[in-house]
Image: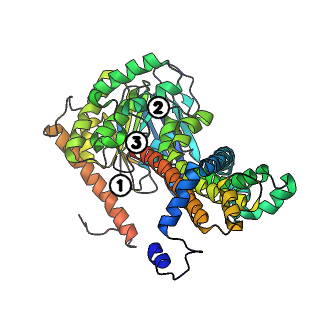
Amino acid sequence: MWWLLSATGAVGSKNLPGPATVWTALWDRISNGSIPVAASRSLIRLAFGMAVAAILGTVVGVWVASSQIVQRSVGSLVVGLQALPPIAWLPLAALWFGFTERAVVFVVIVGAFPAVAIATAGGIRQVSPVLVRAGRTLGARGWNLYREVVVPAAVPSYVEGLRLGWVFAWRSLMASELIVQGGKGLGHSLDRAGRHFDAPTILALMVVIVVIGLAIDFGFAVLDRRVRARRGLVPA
Amino acid sequence: MYSVPEPQLGVPKLSVRAVGKSFLTTRADSVPALDSVSFDVAPGEFVCLLGPSGSGKSTVLNILAGLVRPDGGQVLMDGRPISGPGPDRAVLFQDPALFPWMSVRANVEFALKMLGIPREERRGRAESWLSTVHLSRFADVQPHELSGGMRQRAALARALACRPQVLLADEPFGPLDAQAREILQGEVQRVWAETGTTFVFVTHNVREAALLADRVLLMSAAPGRLLEEYRIRAPRPRSLENPLLSRVVADIHDQLELEVRKVVARETGEEGDQPGLA
């Protein structure tokens, strides 16, 4: 369809280059090193932001699951945050950190952590009471009960939360890189290509962003499947 | 009415004294589940709690396990009040409740791990319990790979691994097919005879109760009270062909049917004596 649109000139080859042109642009940018550099910059930010978001999300999630009061107050706040597009944090982040890499990573963290927190809290709350009861009668109590029964039982939901969270992280990273100038990430490259009306490069970068997204999601899908198969939740 | 006895020789393993319990419903009224239930269980005794559904037999068991607090009365083990769950009282639930992320072996080791027993010893003891329930070959598989009967056998090994003094079982063979049930009844009798563990076993199956128990306690329809007590003196290993046993089974059946009719009468909104439905 893409090929058809560009080949028939319906959109104009300048604004919608054909797959072949994009492929050439992609290959050029990969071989001259600009895309690998940009991608690795972005991935480092993603990894760092996601790691902080995962830790923060886990802590907040466990906290939210710990009591009804926290659940109603902090829990609702986190759900509210989830409704806020992460990029809406950027003006505030820019105020605090300037238009810097820090601001970008901040947006990634606040973008991803609510999903992790919500999934963690939900996972813990949904742990089968049957298993908790069994754990208690087998002598697990307090912290031991949490570590040995509740947390492992919540792992499948937690992995789901990470899988959801990283998508938010990736989107917020691209969005804020587009806005915060002067960096070397994929979003920055996209912004620069836009300024140069370089449609083949724009499309090539979009392909890279999607492909990285698919690759990471595949990784989480494998993890998710393993965790579930081990518990007999899907056929191994 | 009762005084707390000092721990001494000859005290019952478990004492349930004038225990009552009501549950709050969603409409904030409370429904009485137990009405002043009292009984003792001697050390090493096998007691079955039998009753129509809703008779509160599972509630009694959960109170003994320390999972549910009674509203009134006392529950004692060796003369001391039971205040919460503990590894001295293992529980076998209707759902095997094996931890799905652990191998069968790790499940059996769980209680030992909670007691801080070193890995090597844990392994040895789990090994021996797994062989007792004929699951040695399945030590390293995940619970979901086992059949229903095998899961319940693994749960039995897990419950017994820390050598509890009391085993509380809540209709553990309810969902199993007849054959798996028979195998497990055999295993339970063997384990009981070999270990001297005190058993309190909840069931709604009269034959199962008669086959397993030294004493069957029949509970009434809700709110649960003790209705009748049957001491079963048939020699072990038992067979349901034994005329002594079949007579007891018939007796209990008659008594139970009266209770079930009461429930049916109440549920259909009709009071008083109704012609039998069974």
Q: Which residue is mark 3?
A: A230
Mark whose residue sits in front, 3 or 2: 3
Name which residue lies at 81% across and 62% down. Answer: A91
Q: Residue furthest bottom?
A: A10
Q: Nearer the viewer, residue A148 or B78?
A: A148
Name which residue lies at 51% across and 65% down. Answer: A21
Q: Is residue A3 left or right of residue B25?
A: left
Residue B89: image tag: 2
B225 versus B164 height, above or below: below
- Identify the chain of the residue marked 3, using the numbered disc in the image: A
Label 1 Cα crowd, 10 Å radius (few <14 / some 14-19 / many 20+):
many
Residue A72 shows in this picture: no
- Identify the chain of the residue marked 1, using the numbered disc in the image: B
Going by the numbered disc 3, the residue's amino acid type is Arg
Q: What is the CA distance from the residue labelled 1 to the residue labelled 3?
A: 38 Å
Label 2 Cα crowd, 10 Å radius (few <14 / some 14-19 / many 20+):
many
Q: Nearer the viewer, residue B247 or A101?
A: A101
Q: Which residue is mark 1?
A: B52
